[in-house]
Amino acid sequence: MKRTSIGLIMALTLLAQKQTPPPPGAPRPFEFPKTQKKVLANGLTVYAVEDHRLPLVTYDLAVMAGSSLDAPQKAGLAFMVATLLREGTKTRKSNDISKLVDDAGGGLGASTVDDYSSVTSSFMKQYADLGLELLADITVNPTFPQEEIDRQMQQAQSSLQVAYVTAETLAALAAGRALLGTHPYALPTQGTPATLKNLKREDMVAFHQRYYVPGGSVLVIAGDIPPEEGFAKAEKYLGSWKGAPVTGAPLPKPNPGKPGILLIDLPNAVQTQIRVGEASIPRNDPDYIALQAANQVFGGSFNSRLNIKVRANEGLTYNANSSLNSERQAGLFTVSTFTRNEKTAEVIQFILDLYKDWKANPATEQEFKETQDFLIGSFGLSVETAEAVAGRVLGAAINGLGDDYWPNFRSKLLALKREDIAAAVEKHIDLTKLQIVCVGKASDIAKPLEKFGVVTVIKADDFDPVAPDLRKPKPAADASPEGVAAARKLIDRAVAAAGGLEALEKVKDISSRGTMTFLQPMKMDAASEEDIVYPARYRTSMKMAMGEMIQASDGEKAWFKQGAQIQDLPPMLIAEIKKQVQVIGAVGLLREAAAGHATLAMLPDAGVSWKLEGQEVKIYFDPQTGLPARIVQAVLGPRGRVEQETDLADWRDAGGIKLPYAETILSNGAKAAERKWTERKVNTNPSPDLFKKPAQ
């Protein structure tokens, strides 16, 4: 056997054993940086942390405007408000702010967590005034321009569209709801594609006016600046800020359901994301330090019991860990890992067995000593920068820990005893309340999971983290005789407004020419041509700076051409294109409905549900003209099906019927494209060759 193979076997043997680090040295002297505190007349609490190691000054302002204030159907509101702060104020446009920040080599931003939103800036000492001036301006004076709202909404929708098809994201969202129930901490901070669509500019303005106030807010000034100078700057730039703190009822306690298994079905998944845990203590609980130390033993480190068992010894995953995440009013204790589908039940059994063993024996003497030494040593390393110290000071203030919490933290760690860990585990870890969440292929894993309890399966496409039952609401269409009659009345009015049924039935083809502006992922203009021949021929051409792209179907084959490259499209797209032919200009929709071929029902939001051959379209009408104003449907995109809304406007005569000459297309609520037709003709009898794949 080669020497390298022997070495590899030895390395794997060592990996399968608990890794023993060298013994720690004696603790080095450490003193948490001194802070000074002042409360301004307007109620703003200011902390100053003097640190001359670098010529930098950091400002971190927390306002009590976290995502826990969002209503479920407007989840993401606090996040969007914070995101839009620097996109324009009463005196500066977004570009002006960016230029000032870039020219000074600084940083300026805002973010949101459950309990608060923070606005931060960090600049060289010579620009310390500019840093706080800009922070104050975007905090106090944002204007929320509609064009910036649209842009940020597009970006947020695109990001969520990607995130909501990943197992990791779905597991985190589902675990939050399983462990906390309907507690506001369980709602997604960034919202969902559906809840973002519910947000209006007036919601953002009202939220900002109500919650962005100095009363109850905390500003930490850290870096190369004397405290008195920092306090003077705070008074100069934020002293005139007005507003009392908003007092309200405390958040409800977590209300998880009966322990069981929640399975989010991802049919194509080859691995299963696993979460096991329960609701836990808030950050100011006196047992927090002991329980965090206990977590370090169980699954909080590479050498933890969990990782050694599931990863190193059994080889069932690349990573297994546990975490204690505590906030002002509640927390989560969660085990996180993933494995192959066929090993899902086995891994969960290992986790449950480890829980039982940990409950009975929370920490050996050696584990306790290693954990205590690690926590003491890592604490000093974690506060080596002024920014890190500022974060600790801010956290202590937000969570009501007291101004002496961090200066005394090291002594608390030194005073920690093994018995404290055991008591914390006994008090706060309840094996009867453990919730299990899996995201994976239900057909492979649902049956084996039944050994752990009742399995609730929700398809990933149906999962809604803000819905009470975790399922997307499905508007009930009224298919009663009265509902159908009401829908028919709207259709008949639209048919008459578009030229009458006889004229619509004479339309054999439509040829259109104009321009299209793509807004996602970047703005791009194109010359647009579109030709359809009922019932299934379709061709569209986009001429852009980068060249021409053509997509077409002759009813039997579909193809795509870019430059000299031509390729066939999957067979599923032929049926998809045929469906779109019905939708274009609403001609097919109206005449199939008027002829009685499509099934109609009245929607609760004054729209009409149109169904034919497995295709469902929602049609909404202009109350003045009676013509279709919006068409909503599920379309197949690069990342799966998305909800597409097409707003129709500027209806004009075109060969005996009326067609829309302006279209705005939204994807999952975000504006994706705008199209303007300059020419639309009917019955031009285009050649069949136009739709056939060119020879290569």
Image: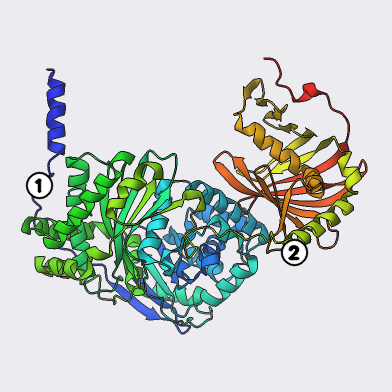
Measured Cα–Cα span from mark 2 to mark 1? 79 Å
Q: Residues within 10 Å of mark 1 (few under 14, many from 20)?
A: few
The residue nearer to you, when weighing 103 against 410, is: 410
Quarter-of-image position of residue 52: bottom left
Q: Is residue 343 left or right of residue 255?
A: left
Point 26% across, 50% down: residue: 348
Mark 1 sits on what residue?
A: 22
Q: Residue furthest right?
A: 656
Percent coordinates x, y for residue 534 in the rendering: 79, 34
The residue nearer to you, when weighing 52 against 61, is: 61
Point 8% across, 50% down: residue: 23
The residue nearer to you, when weighing 575 against 57, is: 575
Image depth: mark 2 or mark 1 in front: 2
Could you tell me the amino acid type at mark 1? Pro
Q: Residue furthest top?
A: 696
Name above or below for residue 67 compared with residue 647: below
Mark 2 sits on what residue?
A: 482
Visible residue check, residue 164: no
Q: Under tag 1, what secondary structure?
A: loop
Name above or below for residue 246 compared with residue 119: below
- Quarter of the rendering occupied by the N terminus: top left
Q: Under tag 2, what secondary structure?
A: helix
Visible residue check, residue 172: yes
